[in-house]
Image (tube, rainbow, N blue to C red):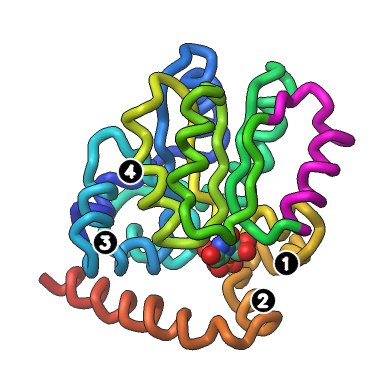
């Protein structure tokens, strides 16, 4: 797990957004993984996920507060959280400003349609390419279409680990483009789900808000976060 911490982006969010924008301007390719404790535990469980996290071409950003706190405990100098939802919002702004092409994969059909309507209204310069919901079996087929469209940005909202594995499987087909797995961001960006109020975000207890809103998350939280804390403590004592 230490290897994952070493690979975390350590500067502030503004610097990161600038790097992403530069990468887009220079038509480079970027695969961004938004890391939280669940991400690291998938890496430890799955050989393929471990490979994608350690790939030099993958950029790992600290999405969850658990990752930031753990990194600091282990003496890694990680500046702040850079969340998937903030990154997705920033990417919409960048795409709108530069008239970039955007593809959207994932979420339920009605969520996706609401998001498309919001993009058409609030980000009118974005050129939308493939937009498909995340509930068909053969999601690889989407990438055959996307490959021909050569998008600047592709947001994949299928949840971990599917979104990262799908991107990683196909990314070599692309010469340029920013590809990110954004979890439940489409639900929030479309207005289908509310993000925690600003104060709760500031207090770094957004995770608690999500559990209270969706109690079925508790098992997932326990399995990934509680075990994660023990592992980090062990690493700290090495
Ligand atoms: N999802 C999907 N296809 C699936 C399973 C999930 O498109 O087969 C979508 C789901 O609708 C949601 C997102 O993936 O929009 C995952 O959201 P979740 O809140 O679990 O992600 P988190 O932000 O917690 O990683």
Q: Earlier in the sequence, mark 2 or mark 1?
A: 1
From where the camera sits, is residue 230 visible?
A: yes
Identify the image quadrant of the N terminus: bottom left
Using the image, determine if residue 132 lies above or below residue 25. Answer: below
Residue drawn where x is 27% and y is 56% of the image: 49
Identify the image quadrant of the C terminus: bottom left
Residue 119 x %, y %: 79, 38
Q: Earlier in the sequence, mark 4 or mark 1?
A: 4
State the separation of the CA atoms marked 2 and 1: 6 Å
State the separation of the CA atoms marked 3 and 1: 28 Å
Q: Is residue 194 magenta?
A: no
Residue 15 x %, y %: 51, 30
Instruction: Kindly identify which residue carries mark 4.
Output: 169
- The reply, left or right, for residue 147 in relation to residue 201 is left
Q: Earlier in the sequence, mark 3 or mark 2?
A: 3
Instruction: Kindly identify which residue carries mark 2.
Output: 209
């Amino acid at each position: 797990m230490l290897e994952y911490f070493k690979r975390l982006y350590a500067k502030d969010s503004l610097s990161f957004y600038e790097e992403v924008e530069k990468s887009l301007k220079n038509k480079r390719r970027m695969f961004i993984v938004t890391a939280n404790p669940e991400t690291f535990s998938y890496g430890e469980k799955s050989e393929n996920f471990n490979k994608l996290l350690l790939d030099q071409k993958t950029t790992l950003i600290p999405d969850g507060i658990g990752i930031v706190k753990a990194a600091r405990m282990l003496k890694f100098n990680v500046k702040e959280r850079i969340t998937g939802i903030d990154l997705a919002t920033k990417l919409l702004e960048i795409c709108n400003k530069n008239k970039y092409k955007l593809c959207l994969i994932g979420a339920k059909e009605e969520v996706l349609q609401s998001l498309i309507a919001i993009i058409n209204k609030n980000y009118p310069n974005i050129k939308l390419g493939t937009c498909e919901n995340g509930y068909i079996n053969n999601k690889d087929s989407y990438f055959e279409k996307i490959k021909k469209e050569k998008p600047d940005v592709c947001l994949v909202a299928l949840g971990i680990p599917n979104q990262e594995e799908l991107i990683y499987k196909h990314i070599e087909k692309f010469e340029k483009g920013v590809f990110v797995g954004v979890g439940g961001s489409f639900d929030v960006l479309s207005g289908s789900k509310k993000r925690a109020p600003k104060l709760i975000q500031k207090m770094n207890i957004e995770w608690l808000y999500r559990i209270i809103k969706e109690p079925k998350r508790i098992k997932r939280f326990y399995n990934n976060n509680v075990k994660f804390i023990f592992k980090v403590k062990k690493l700290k004592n090495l």
